Image (tube, rainbow, N blue to C red):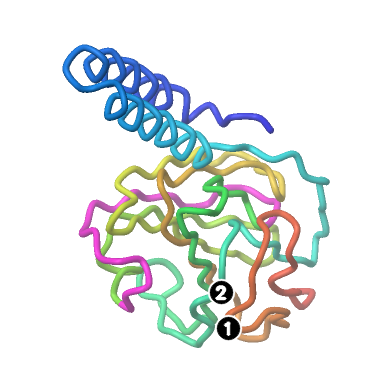
Amino acid sequence: MKIHKEGAPIILCAAALAIVLAVLSFWLLPTAAAWIVSVAAWIGVLFITSFFRSPSRPLLQDDGAVYSPADGTIVALEEVEEKEYFKDNRIVVSVFMSIWNVHINWFPVSGTVDYFRHHHGLFLVAWHPKSSEDNERTTTVVDMGGQKIMFRQIGGMVARRIVSYARVGHRVEQNSQCGFIKFGSRVDLFLPLDADIRVKLGDKVVGTQTLIARLKKQ
């Protein structure tokens, strides 16, 4: 299992802190207590390292398909009014990433990045209905050459750092990495109303592997 590049500084800091805690523990505490503190510190390092794992997966590409942009659980699937870019009604499919999930995000379709914006905001729990509009987030629109797909990376109460690799005007490939949300949160997909949705509420999805929807040809 590889470790994602976004995790290296954090893992190194956590390991350094674990070493300091271990040294201080054996200096200041009884031996038994020092071992407990040291083991707990290194378990914490392993736990943080797991956040930044980067699995190897088959590269699936299909022009008419929308694949999951994240690992997690489908927590919302409904028609909503999209106010930022399309300014019309769309089907939103929300994938919630728990602390146990891989936290990499992927482009759900291929095309050209037509729009990107980073929004500063709150840090409500990611499943809160208003988090899509009020939380720290990024919005990315990919022009597939006939229709456009929008997705949002959304921060949460724990996730305080969103990384996006999207650049306006750049060509992106389906299921290539589009970013990282450090320590979890959620990704929302905004799809046309006539999209053929292939998931339901509560489904567990795997980024780059789970088919979220099929798009009608334009």
Under circle 2, the secondary element is strand
Q: 75 or 24, which is in the foreground? A: 24
What are the residue bounds of the magenta stretch? 109-129
> Viewed as shown, does residue 121 lie left or right of 48?
left
- Determine whether, in the image, residue 209 is placed left or right of residue 23: right
**On the rendered image, what quadrant is the N terminus found in?**
top right
Say if the magenta span includes residue 197: no
Dot 2 or dot 1: first in sequence order is 2
Q: Are marks 2 and 1 in contact (CB under 8 Å)?
A: yes
Instruction: Residue 193: name its quadrant.
Output: bottom right
Q: Is residue 29 above or below residue 37?
A: above
Residue where numbered disc 1 is placed: 201
Q: Is residue 186 above or below residue 55?
A: below
**Is the C terminus in the top left, top right, bottom left or bottom right quadrant?**
bottom right
22 relative to 1 in the view: left or right: left
Q: Position of residue 150 (x, y in %)?
A: 53, 63
- CA neighbours of label 2 inside 10 A, class few (<14), some (14 to 19), many (20+): many
